[in-house]
Amino acid sequence: MSCNIELICPDCRSKLQHDSRGYNCLACGSSFEILDENIIDLLPKHNKAGDEIIYRHSDYKSQFPYLSEIRNYFYTKKLAAWSMSWGHKNLIRLIGGNVNRTQVDLGIGRGDHYDYVDDKNSLIGVDYDADAMRDIRKKGIDAPLVRADITRLPFPDQSFDVVTSTNAFEHFYYIEVCIEEIYRILKNDGVLAVSFPIVGGWLMDTLSRFGPQREFKRRYGLNWDKVLKVEHCNTSRYILEAVRRLFIIKKIIWSPFVISSHNLNMFVTFQAYKNLEFI
Ligand SMILES: [Zn+2]
């Protein structure tokens, strides 16, 4: 496996040198390891935007042991897993497969999006959670997997034809910085396509109150509102507003009810292009 895209230092953005043990930055001296399962660990050593807030957050710390169980809960409930698949399908409806295009997926997690693309080994997966990405190798996928901080992406300017993300934007702290990073790494004629649950909408919030909320109170005595506040830091309205600062949104798919409403849907998927006025 090799990464066709050049990698840069997340600390100082200089080109990285590759050797058998990992990647080194000759400019600032940072060095980066390759983890087991061939995951390239390019978390910044100095320039971290995200760590501090979330990992010192007392609610996050108390909930952390349960977060993977929360994830498993969603993926083992058929109805929840089925509704989570809408985002992936809608993305493919908007932008098609990924053949002959350079594509990165941000917040790839356990790699669900690989199930929906044609050329699996060419889709670069990025996530903060190396454990989640280890599961991707179990699917026999050999694509480059990069552990990164989404506010300091280790890719040069204008590297990608396509940037995608499914069911992840609601989790990204410093979403404005993430969107600036996406703007930087996307080619000027590239496409951004993103899908996420409608946090802050009436239907989604109501369903989650009657489903997961009860379950988490019963199982762990956890206050679901607090869990959600940490896990889902961005509402759908805020995400779209932040995207529109730098991108022009061309198409939106609302699921399941098609009409344009945050309150009456569960997921939103959009396709956007760079607003080139900012270059
Ligand atoms: Zn450096």
Image: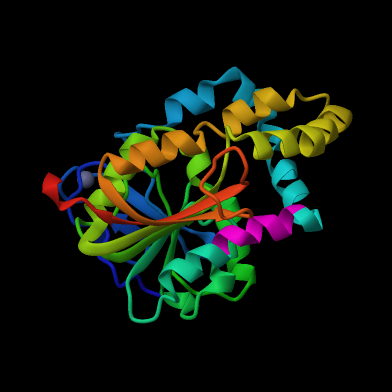
| Residue numbers of the magenta segment | 80-88
Q: Is residue 197 left or right of residue 177?
A: right
Which residue is most to the right? 218
Tell me residue 153's x, y (percent).
32, 49
Q: Nearer the viewer, residue 235 or 103?
A: 235
Instruction: Determine the quadrant in which ligand 1 lies.
Output: top left
Q: Is residue 248 above or below residue 163?
A: above
Identify the image quadrant of residue 197: top right
Task: Report the predominant secondary structure element of the magenta stretch.
Answer: helix
Identify whether 88 is placed above or below 140. Answer: above
Whether residue 10 can be seen here: no
User: What residue do we see at 59% from left, 34% from top?
Assistant: 231
Tell me if residue 251 is in the magenta stretch: no
Residue 78 place in picture, x, y as percent:
80, 58
Where is residue 214 drawn, in percent x and y?
A: 84, 32
**Residue 82 sits inside the magenta stretch:** yes
Q: Residue 104: name its quadrant.
A: bottom left
Q: Position of residue 71 (x, y in %)?
A: 69, 47
**In the current view of this chain or complex, which residue is farthest to the front?**
259
Q: Quadrant of the N terminus?
A: bottom left
Q: Would you identify the image quadrant in which residue 138 lies?
A: bottom right
Q: Residue at x 43, y 55 (%)?
A: 270
Q: Name which residue lies at 34% across and 65% down.
A: 162
Compare residues 200 and 8 and report the one nearer the observer: 200
Of all residues, the one furthest to the top in this rendering is 58
* Residue sitting at x 28%, y 46%: 181
Q: Quick one: 28 or 108, which is closer to the camera?
A: 108
